[in-house]
Image (cartoon, rainbow, N blue to C red):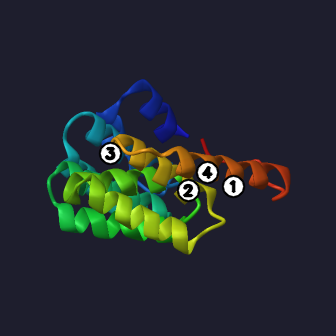
Amino acid sequence: LLGVAMAVEGDLDGLAALEIGTEEFSFLPSVAVGSGFIAGGDPAAALPAFLQTARLEREESWLGMGISQLVSGRYDQALMNINAAVWESPTDVQTARVYAQALGTVNGPDAAIEAISALADANVNNGAWALVLAETMQYAGLDNTEATANAIALNQWAVTFGGTANAHG
C-alpha cells in the first residue's frame, strides 16, 4: 500500500527506492514506478520497473514494456510485447486500444485497420475488438457506421445476455 500511496502523491524517487514486487506480492508499485517514468518523459527508466512487474503480472509487464519501447522508438520490440499483452488479455479494451495505436504509429492507420479487422473477424463475439476497429476506422477518417453498430450490438448483448457488466466503451 505504501507504493500506491507514493504513486498517488507523485513520489517517483520514493517509489524507485522501494524493493519492487515484494510488498505483499503486489505488482502495483512497480507498475506505478514504470507508469510514472513514462508520464515523466523517461521511458527508458520505466523498463526495469516493468521487468520487475513481469515476475507477478505478465500482462501488465508486457503492456508497460511495450509502451515504454514504443515511446523510446524501439518499435519491433514494442509491437512484440504489446501483442503478447493482447493475447494474455484478449477482451481488455484498453489493451486493444494500445495495440491499435501502436500499429498505427509504427505501420500507419491502414495497417492498423487491417490487423484489428482481422482480429475482430476472428473473434466475432468479442466486443473489445469490434469497438477498437470502429475507433481505429474513425481515427483514419473512414466511415465506421457499420463497425460502430456492430460494436454496440455486441456490447449490449454482453450486458443483457452474457451475464457480464464488463462491456466496453
Amino acid identity at mark 1: Leu
Dots 2 and 1: beta carbons under 8 Å?
yes
**Mark 2 vs mark 1, CA separation in Å:** 8 Å
Q: Residue 94 carries which label?
A: none
Position in image of residue 108 (x %, y %): 23, 55
Pointer 2 and pointer 4: residues touching (CB < 8 Å)?
A: yes
- The residue at the point 33 percent across, 63 percent down is 51
- Residue at mark 3: 140
Report the amino acid beneath label 2: Ala
Q: Position of residue 169 (x, y in %)?
A: 60, 41
Marks 2 and 4 sit apart, C-alpha to C-alpha, by 5 Å
Give the labeled residue for mark 2.
130
Q: What amino acid is labelled 3 in the image?
A: Ala
The secondary element bearing badge 2 is classed as: helix
Query: Secondary structure beneath disc 3?
Result: loop
**Residue 12 shows up from this direction:** yes
Asked if one can make out residue 95 in the rendered structure from this viewpoint, the answer is no
Whether label 1 touches label 4, CB < 8 Å:
yes
Q: Give how far across and how far down residue 107 sits, in percent.
A: 21, 60
Q: How crowded is mark 2: few (under 14 residues within 10 Å), some or many (20 or more)?
A: many
